[in-house]
Image (tube, helix red, strand yellow):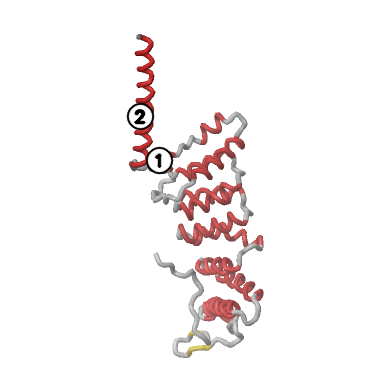
Amino acid sequence: MIFKTSKFSQVILIVAIACCFLIHAFLNQHSTLPPIDISMQKSAININHEALKLFSMGQKRLIVAIMWIKTLIDSDLEHYKSRDLNSWMYLRFKSIVELDPLFLQAYQFGGQYLSIIKDDDLGAKDIYDRGLEQYSKNHKILVYGGLHYYFELDDPQGALKFWNPLIFLNKVPFTLKSLISRVKASNGRLEDAYSLILKLYKSTPEGSVFKKKFSENLYAIKSEIDLICLNSQTNSIHCNKNDFDGGAYLYNKTDGKYIANKKWKPFRIKTRAK
């Protein structure tokens, strides 16, 4: 009799457990639980790079490779609005280049990701600056680092430290040369700007709309250089008295100043809407 009671209890227990599973499955299927959404900024783990150096035991490259892969997997699209160099992706990229300063991808792609996706302007600036120190002739770092300074930091003069080496490498993209020349002109380096645009002008096919635009730019830059010289009180005898088109500058007897034959405006950085 005792055996039968015990067996009956086991059956009841099994049935009860089965019912619990069925109820659990039914509730899961027919009820909506609130989603758990924790941002990577709050959940990401970043170990101090000095501690990583101390405990790497000669395996820095292995640790860097693991961190890089983990960063790519965890990468998110959330903008970082604070300007305090504390975004999780910046801290991750910083740790990577601290451990391995020659890890090129962290500069090339890390800088772009921070600049374009995360809107972490200061973080991207630091990564690009570090990249420039290690890879002063890398085309991507020079181009994108300069673009970040120019557009995101609104610092055209800072952009030149990235773009100037491109000129000597002869790897300046077509449209970037014009932008660089405007920055140089805005910095008072009119002769450098003229030289850059002249190269573009000579390499552009006849009849092209770009040829016409470059011609207008050259006319403006040369007119400014020459008229400054002609209208100065000293050494005007050594000034060029013909404009880019070959025409002589006009002398205005009313105010005693030379003027150009055509209307022109200073070749400068275009004002961007804030």
Could you say which disc has been placed on residue 20 in the image? 2
Q: Position of residue 73 (x, y in %)?
A: 52, 43
Q: Is residue 141 left or right of residue 42?
A: right
Could you say which disc has been placed on residue 86 in the image? none
Secondary-structure class at tag 1: helix
- In the foreground, 149 or 185: 149
Kind of residue at badge 2: Cys
Q: Say which residue appears at 52% left-offset and 53% top-offset.
A: 112
Q: Position of residue 207 (x, y in %)?
A: 62, 82
Q: How many marks?
A: 2
Q: Position of residue 234 (x, y in %)?
A: 54, 77
Q: Which residue is the extreme one toward the top? A: 2
Q: Quadrant of the C terminus?
A: bottom left
Q: Residues within 10 Å of mark 1 (few under 14, many from 20)?
A: few
Q: Which residue is mark 1?
A: 42
Above-or-below relation of 203 to 55: below
Q: Say which residue appears at 66% left-offset and 76% top-offset.
A: 202
The first of marks 2 and 1 along the sequence is 2
Q: In which image quadrant can residue 63 be found? A: top right
Q: Is residue 84 left or right of residue 107?
A: left
Kind of residue at badge 1: Lys
Give me the C-alpha separation between circle 2 and circle 1.
36 Å
Q: Say which residue appears at 55% left-offset and 57% top-offset.
A: 144
Above-or-below relation of 24 to 128: above
